[in-house]
Image: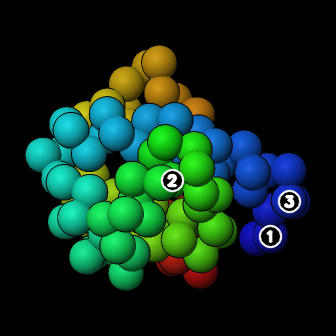
Amino acid sequence: MAFSTEKKEMMINSLVERLPLIRQEMNVSQTELGEKVGLSRQSISSIERGISKLSWNNYLAIMMFLVANREKCTSLLNENNSDLDNDLNEVIKILDS
């Protein structure tokens, strides 16, 4: 399954908008997330503040971290965030194939 550039951008933007809240709910610092996905704390901070763009590969790394820790982040399943939950399920399908 391949995503268009526009779809990837939408998925990335959806995650970036919610990443600080997701990290807070999971009780994960920027440093801890960065260590898990191969980025520095400064990179995570820049991404969250909109200074740096999140690449597709780093998006997938963060989503894999979220998949592995899904039970810690109920906001992904919140009705208001259903687009992010759908994205997460699409990424799971990619990983399973």
Q: Amino acid at mark 2?
A: Ile
- Residue under numbered circle 3: 5
Q: Relative to 66, does residue 94 appear above or below in the rendering?
A: below
> Label 1's element?
loop
> Would residue 77 appear left or right of 14 to someone viewing this image?
left
Kindly tell me whether residue 65 is visible in this rendering: no
- State the residue position of label 2: 47
Quadrant of image for the C terminus: bottom right
Secondary structure beneath dot 2 equals helix
Amino acid under label 3?
Answer: Thr
Percent position of residue 61, x then y: 45, 72
Dots 3 and 1: beta carbons under 8 Å? no
Q: Quadrant of the N terminus?
A: bottom right
Q: Residues within 10 Å of mark 1 (few under 14, many from 20)?
A: few
Give the answer, above or below, for where 95 lies relative to 5.
below
Kindly report the distance in space between the C-alpha atoms of the residues bearing marks 1 and 2.
24 Å
From the top left corner, tell me how far across and down residue 40 is, in percent: 35, 73
Q: Secondary structure at mark 3?
A: helix
Label 3 to label 1, Cα distance in Å? 9 Å
Coloration of the structure image: rainbow
Q: Residue at x 72, y 44 (%)?
A: 10
Residue indicated by mark 1: 2
Q: Could you tell me if the residues under marks 1 and 2 are in contact, i.e. CB atoms within 8 Å? A: no
